[in-house]
Amino acid sequence: MAVLVNRDTRLICQGITGKVGTFHSNGAIAYGTRFVGGVTPGKGGQWWTADDGSRYPVWNTVAEAMREGGANATMIFVPAPAAADAILEAIEAGMPLIVAITEGIPVRDMYAVKRALAAHPEVRFIGPNCPGIITPGECKIGIMPGYIHRRGSTGIVSRSGTLTYEAVYQTTRCGLGQSTCIGIGGDPIKGLDFIDCLRLFNEDPETEQIVLIGEIGGDSEERAAAYIKEQVRKPVIGFIAGTRAPKGKRMGHAGAIVSGNSGTAEAKLAALRAAGVHIAESPATIGETVLAALRARR
Amino acid sequence: MKLHEFQGKALLRQAGVPLLAGRPCRTPDEAEAAARELGPPVVVKAQIHAGGRGKGTVYADAACTTLVRQGGVALAASPEEARQLAGQLLGNYLRTAQTGGVGKRINTVLVEAGCRIARELYVSVLLDRAAALPVLVASDAGGMDIEELAAREPQRIRRRHIDPALGLLEHQARRLGYELGLTPPQVAQFVPTARALVRAFLEHDADLVEINPLVVAADDRVLALDCKLSIDDNALFRHPEIAAWLDPDEEDPAELEAKRHEMAFVKLDGNIGCMVNGAGLAMATIDAIALYGWQQGAAPANFLDVGGGASAEKVTIAFKLILRDPAVEAILVNIFGGIMKCDTIAQGVLSAVREVGLDRPLVVRLEGTRVEEGKRLLAESGLAVIPADDLKDGCIKAAEAAARWRAARGLPPRPPLPAPASFATAIR
């Protein structure tokens, strides 16, 4: 089952002819994702050649890619100044799944994205500033290293790229594997949030436990904790980065900042604990915390 | 990017926010001329990026040993007094409750006309992340610390979400004005001021506009007396004229240099320098150093995210940044190689070590793509690199290496730090 993406996902890349878009389109193809082509305005009608020699059409617009290529998912590698427009184009075209990898999109541009999303409930948007989404063995959309994943029972949702890889690596090594891993991104305004992903994992029969990786800034984790307490009947394992972050400093991610007394790691950890989430003390112990949680359940 | 008060006010003025007349001055001569032009009495305000300036203390040195005067904001009754005040402030250092024990150099003073204040209000505009909308926050309790007020008297704080395409609507501002207890003539002044503040926030891609206090003058004018304004870093490409206002005296030089190379660096006060790929893992690494190293007195000396595509050159720059800090007694490199392969990282680390000439112990934890090749390169290099199995092991080894480094120099061991809060969790 897994969630959001699978072998029926037909992926395009917006910004396919750029260096980064080319690199990660090749990564998706090498992983076995059903890749159908790309969009670069002004280069429509050309062909893009993958590293393995296969050729894919380039379209001028997302609407064409959907009509002619049957695309139902897009990954966006358009540079930040033009990224919001690329996202808006995909939303307006009704693309069912949009994944924006681009880092550095201004907040003001994201207001427009949120407004367009509200008018298009059929569209799901992941990111921006995220590693993407992967269902092991079926579909990889984004910049994560595919080979560390193994298909299994853990759903992973995270605000951080490299911490997701840690969680993946450890759940692979302890033999549980992953159903789907969703990087929701490190920006203050984003598409899918923890709650959306928790709901999907909670309803997915293949997902037996959920790893949630949060960080300082905002209150997504607190809201997720309330949802977990109310709705989630599967074990949830949590980690929060930024316990030692000084106040008022942005820690790499645009959204990772403690403003005044809000967004602290302590408040998030307390909320998650109160919701019965099993907390990993460091990213090195995510795997063992998952196993401990499962043992406690039996 | 944080702005000085006088810079923020220049943006507010462009957006049509009523302000007192004022002149930024960089010399006592300029301050005297400004006071003469504006007409005394005037207020002379030290320009640094910190609140609490009025109650701060001015010193002749950044370490705050030689006292100059109390108060970084003062009233001058004459142009001569304005000149004398500017002389005491400019080139000296102001320490406030928010500057963290050190003084910040005053390069500019703002000389402003005075006004008769009838009431003080609080107004700010910022992002409400949960709603994904800008929000206007207002209170009738001006001049107070807003966090304190929120904790003590939350009912005195009012919030209005703003449609970013439309700005603050007239009726929203009007209703807010009445709720704040303003009289009809005051409300008539408040509405355009509040709307202009929101316009400034939106037009300049601000992530915060805070006016504390927003004053109602005796003649019912509604004026921004103070201004704290910062711009969304991600939007600076749209505002090159604002980006050029960056005051290097307000920034950590290492943070600036890291930014130039598309890395994120934050100076911390511990002894373990660290270099990590990815913001989340970098945060988790500084947490882990504190968690596993406290018994040896170890704490992180910095946060450093070298980003996804760190090249050998970037690693070299990162090492130089870390080593420049004399407080660093050991370095922990923590890399999860995904797209960036571990052997590439290892090569980067080795070439950086050869170029920089490492004089402090180096612990390296590698995991991920081509990890065996990476570890082999480090082991066969002949350099004294301490390999770590995982992050916990790396933190413990870094703390121990720092302790040995101190001992070898005849320095006393660091006292243990308070134990971090327990992470033990009840399994349900």
Image (spheres, rainbow, N blue to C red):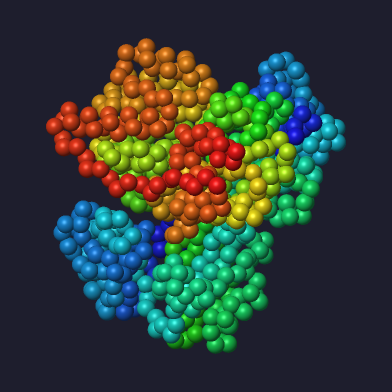
**Residue drawn 47% across and 86% down?**
B219
- The answer to whether residue B243 is left or right of residue B300 is right
The extreme right residue here reads A67
| Figure check: A149 above or below B133 | above
| Figure check: B242 above or below A42 | below
Where residue A115 sits: x, y (%)? 70, 55
The extreme front residue here reads A298
**Residue drawn 66% across and 30% down?**
A152
**Residue drawn 56% across and 53% down?**
A275
**Residue drawn 58% across and 64% down?**
B135
Q: Is residue B239 visible?
A: no
Where residue B143 sits: x, y (%)? 41, 74
Nearest to the observer: residue B194 or residue B154: B154
| Figure check: B67 above or below A103 | below
- The answer to whether residue B413 is left or right of residue A55 is left
| Figure check: B313 above or below B131 | above
Nearest to the observer: residue B245 or residue B383: B383
Where residue B110 sits: x, y (%)? 35, 66
- The answer to whether residue A110 is left or right of residue B38 is right
Residue B56: quarter of image: bottom left
Callout count: 0
The extreme left residue here reads B410
- The answer to whether residue B347 is left or right of residue A43 is left
Residue B228: quarter of image: bottom left
Where residue B259 sits: x, y (%)? 44, 40
Q: Is residue B38 visible?
A: yes
